[in-house]
Amino acid sequence: MNSVSLHGRTYRPPSGPVVIVCVDGCEPDYLNLAIGAGAAPWFASLVTRGTCLTADCVVPSFTNPNNLSIVTGAPPSVHGICGNYFWDRDAQAEVMMNDPRYLRGGTLLAAFADAGAKVAVVTAKDKLRALLGHRMKGICFSSEKADKVTAVENGIVDAMGLTGMPLPSVYSAALSEFVFAAGVALLERERPDILYLSTTDYVQHKHAPGTPGANAFVAMMDGYLAKLDRLGATIVVTADHGMNAKTDAFGRPNIVFLQDLADHWYGAGTARVILPITDPYVVHHGALGSFATIYLPQETVGDAEVRLRSVPGIWQVHGRDEACRRYELPPDRVGDIVVVAERLWTLGTSRTRHDLTGLDAPLRSHGGVSEQQVPLIANRLAPDLPDRRWRNFDAFDLALNRLG
Amino acid sequence: MNSVSLHGRTYRPPSGPVVIVCVDGCEPDYLNLAIGAGAAPWFASLVTRGTCLTADCVVPSFTNPNNLSIVTGAPPSVHGICGNYFWDRDAQAEVMMNDPRYLRGGTLLAAFADAGAKVAVVTAKDKLRALLGHRMKGICFSSEKADKVTAVENGIVDAMGLTGMPLPSVYSAALSEFVFAAGVALLERERPDILYLSTTDYVQHKHAPGTPGANAFVAMMDGYLAKLDRLGATIVVTADHGMNAKTDAFGRPNIVFLQDLADHWYGAGTARVILPITDPYVVHHGALGSFATIYLPQETVGDAEVRLRSVPGIWQVHGRDEACRRYELPPDRVGDIVVVAERLWTLGTSRTRHDLTGLDAPLRSHGGVSEQQVPLIANRLAPDLPDRRWRNFDAFDLALNRLG
């Protein structure tokens, strides 16, 4: 197999099975505190024989932009996916960005498959599957729809038979466990050259690092990762984003309702607030994250920036150009203003449009710069790493080019 | 008793006993998760009958600047205390800032005592005692030196007799418990009009929110606060700063050694890095926080700012004027450059000057903007509060002017 070049970087071919794991919402302290509690012996074993970097994910610190960055090795300005959802100015409609037609560049998964590698992908939610599997020859399915796979669509016919697990609920820790269990079975049975596993942050939205629910989740991962390791895989674990409490000390969500503010300032409907966290699965976070973008008439942009900067809970307000430069975003899919919340705050549209009745635990969420730092871990030593800013989308580079 | 005016604000006299509590390092999630675990029934009871705001503390988010801000109702630009320690350009020496001669304004504690109020102060560590008690008639002592009180110095002769507790170690949860136990005894026996209690963050430096050690600490506080409440006190609880993990996912400290960098760039000793967290008690954090200030020759300032901005782990680099404007600091006690670390990072001087052997748990610390958000809680409702940025140094204003 030859090297693969994509988006300005060259990647060596895998010399044995390589597993890249994106743990959704894996704030570094989840691992640190689970190690301290004795719940993660495999991670603990890497302290001497592995590599651990603290890397920056892509802002907005959401799932799809970061999974796509990891599998392309590039930021959203290159691959185009900057949220779950954006305002299509041409169509004058709010559209989901989980259709591959919004993807602007190829993935490493497809490129390696084209180069002759055997590639397999398992993701928790189906919303990511089509993007990750775009033009990729190989196995690609989600836990969520593991019972509906077809050879043509997913490259596998018996995904449910891999694990013996029942089909998990989309709101469960089991949805992620299914990913790992299927990954171990695939590595044993299919021996892919490249295996990409991506979980869901259902647990992280509810459980703080070091608490029993969180430690149990890390312990589950740790057991499967140890199996992958014993099967001879080179493993790199990273995250799409971190996770923070988004409440006051009494556990009530801290929310700035941006649409309500803009309606009050400029008249109802003058501005359009887009929350790129929004997708069909919002029960566990009420569509509340720490990043928003606002479309509004040009003559109000400057005024709105000034007003927004003085709103408690808002941390950063940038015009489109500055935001796209700073966060490497595609300008045509970003509003006139980008707003980032403070660490313990979220951004909403209107008070009446967020259903928080599904929140059965104090809100924890992500999307902001406060959730940008994530682990970048390998089960091999990496000699002579340069002292630079690492990104989660260096995961393939680390796995293929830099490990000893 | 008349109203008291200080530093541009007017405070109503207390109509009954008022207790202001500064819980050192009380990241809001400590309370939220303890409430969720059932460990804090008193805090839980306030959800319906009390007030909870998310407020900003003073940056650098360290203990002394914030305690002094709370008791003066003003930022460090007014009271002068911007760290534990600064570089005295006149004396050409690094000096501790815990001597009252560095305090530039009076405190509300002294002002109320002068107005005829009975005032009592109990603080965990003695380093704060002299500043808090400056020119104050009344009781003022520390847990640390409760066995050494005198009537002249502390306004009390039997501090050890208040609680029956043995003198606690300076590195212990008991040092803080002693503060609360003494506070309850003082409220019962002396019935002060104003009681100020300030704890130490020994526990918070070691235990993450929601973990057993943290919940036990909150439960301890909760019990004493319930007693103060039953004794009829109006209680406001706030914090000097929050707390974050400062490690990678393996629990190893993330540190930028600024003095080593500056020595490498400009030659040994050309720059002087000051870490204002440094004080005589550094075993539990190794003098590692997320804020530093650097003195260096004028001709290198611009170059150093540019270089520092590209160092991984550094989040913000400001010149003195901008930093002092932004964080309301006294320019004559701040270096040429102010550096703030990213959330999971700390700033050190030289690798050889930090003794980390005392760290028996993964480093958790503070000092940066990432630890700026703190609770501001009262055991009364506050009708018609304005929607503005609240500060921890609004604690006296909230207690005396705004509660129902």
Image: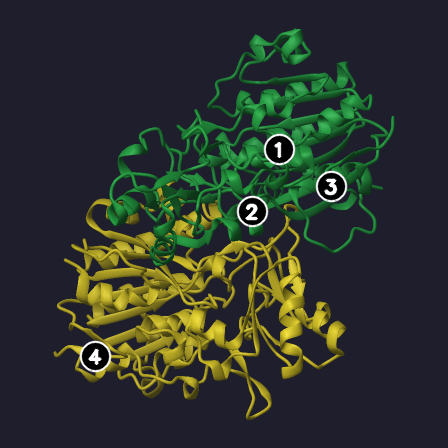
Chain colours: A yellow, B green
Label 1 element class: helix
Residue A271 shown left or right of residue A97 in the figure: right
Residue A5 badge: 4
- Report how far apart the C-alphas of labels 1 and 3 lie in the structure: 27 Å
Disc 2: which chain? B
Give the quadrant of the C terminus of chain A. Answer: bottom left
Please report contact status of discs 2 and 1: CB closer than 8 Å, yes or no. no
Q: Disc 4 marks which amino acid? A: Ser
Label 4 element class: strand
Q: Which of marks 2 and 1 is nearer the N terminus?
A: 1
Which residue is denoted by mark 1 in the rendering? Answer: B68
Instruction: Name the foreground residue: B74 vs B33.
Output: B74
Q: Disc 1 marks which amino acid? A: Leu
Relative image position of residue B71 (x, y in whole percent): 67, 32
Which residue is denoted by mark 3 in the rendering? Answer: B46
Disc 4: which chain? A
- Front disc: 4 or 2: 2
Label 3 element class: helix
Which quadrant of the structure image shows residue B297?
A: top left
Instruction: Name the foreground residue: A293 vs A19.
Output: A293
- Report how far apart the C-alphas of labels 2 and 3 lie in the structure: 23 Å
**Mark 2 neighbour density, 10 Å: few (under 14) some (14–19) many (20 or more):** many
Q: Which of marks 2 and 3 is nearer the N terminus?
A: 3
- Report how far apart the C-alphas of labels 4 and 3 lie in the structure: 59 Å
- Front disc: 1 or 4: 1
- Report how far apart the C-alphas of labels 2 and 1 lie in the structure: 16 Å
